[in-house]
Amino acid sequence: MAKPRYSRLPGRKPPSPSSSSTMMLTMLIMCTFVILILLALGILSIPSASDSPKANDLSSIVHNTVHDVVEEGRPEQWVEVISWEPRAFVYHNFLTQEECEYLISLAKPNMQKSTVVDSATGKSRDSRVRTSSGTFLARGRDKIIRNIEKKIADFTFLPMDHGEGVQVLHYEVGQKYEPHFDYFLDEFNTKNGGQRMATVLMYLSDVEEGGETVFPSAKGNISAVPWWNELSDCGKEGLSVKPKMGDALLFWSMKPDASLDPSSLHGGCPVIKGNKWSATKWVRVNEYKI
Ligand SMILES: O=C(O)CCC(=O)C(=O)O
């Protein structure tokens, strides 16, 4: 009869369930202890709701920025969120001084009294609502314009061929553009490219006083902007951006669900002192054929 085989090694007892749970408890206590030490030293922090700025909390906008790499000999570039209703962003030093001067020099010989679109007929007409002068520069007309249009496409994430030609505007003292929408309410103007979904407004000059771009229906605490004390009375009627040469304001006329955004109502305040030059690029939902 075969004999049962026994191991010569001393027998090991399997761990009892109570000893393994004691080990786990000890490890848990040790981990908690380590986390508490890291929290006390400030190496770890618990995110709280008050850390993240609320939408429309304009007092936080100076911190709400994205900085770009600083190129040698070029002013710093950074993007600032100025509002979520409407969605609006300022890209500081978007254009160089040379680009601003180039756009003005191209436009100057062809400036004409600005018009507005009649929402009943869809046709352009003269109006006291808009007293500036302006002209269009054809899309892609030269290398410098194409380079600016490429920068706009990168900023907006919208294709270059969805953009209309840049419209250069000039406002003298007293000239203005009353609050209006950039989207159309007629069919005629949306045949080519569909609705206007975003606007990039580039400031080609500083303005000594007035000339702000104002959003009278923006939601939020409009007086919390850092430049509040520099604004004209018109600028204080809403969320305002003070023109500064080279800066670009991007705002959306449509919400992310593609419905029209009435909070995008905006206007150009009367210039009180100095001159205002700006360049507007309207970007459509679809390709804009030229
Ligand atoms: O000049 C401004 O600040 C506003 C211009 C504007 O509203 C436009 O071009 O649609």
Image (cartoon, rainbow, N blue to C red):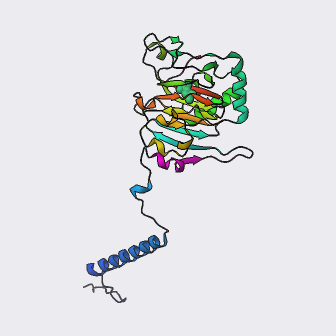
In the current view of this chain or complex, which residue is farthest to the left? 1
Q: Looking at the image, which residue is at 54% across and 48% down?
A: 62
Q: Is residue 255 above or below residue 73?
A: above
Horizontal arrangement in the rendering, residue 55 relative to residue 1 (left or right) = right
Asked if residue 68 is among those painted magenta in the image, a careful observer would answer yes
Q: Out of 132 and 265, give the one closest to the viewer.
A: 132
Q: Is residue 112 above or below residue 4?
A: above
Q: Out of 230 and 263, give the one closest to the viewer.
A: 230
Q: Looking at the image, which residue is at 45% across and 75% down?
A: 37
Horizontal arrangement in the rendering, residue 66 relative to residue 204 (left or right) = left
Horizontal arrangement in the rendering, residue 151 relative to residue 19 (left or right) = right
For the N terminus, which image quadrant?
Answer: bottom left
Q: Is residue 238 among the parts visible in the rendering?
A: no
Q: Quadrant of residue 146?
A: top right
Looking at the picture, how far across and down is residue 131, in whole percent?
Answer: 57, 19
| Ligand 1 sits in quadrant | top right
Q: Quadrant of residue 126?
A: top right
Point out the stretch of residues depicted in magenta.
Answer: 57-72
Looking at the picture, how far across and down is residue 22, in whole percent?
Answer: 31, 80
Looking at the picture, how far across and down is residue 123, in whole percent?
Answer: 50, 11
Q: Is residue 78 among the parts visible in the rendering?
A: yes
Looking at the picture, how far across and down is residue 53, in whole percent?
Answer: 44, 50
Image label count? 0
Asked if residue 203 is among those painted magenta in the image, a careful observer would answer no
Q: Quadrant of residue 209?
A: top right
Q: Out of 253 and 231, give the one closest to the viewer.
A: 231
Q: Looking at the image, which residue is at 50% across and 41% down?
A: 82
For the C terminus, which image quadrant?
Answer: top right
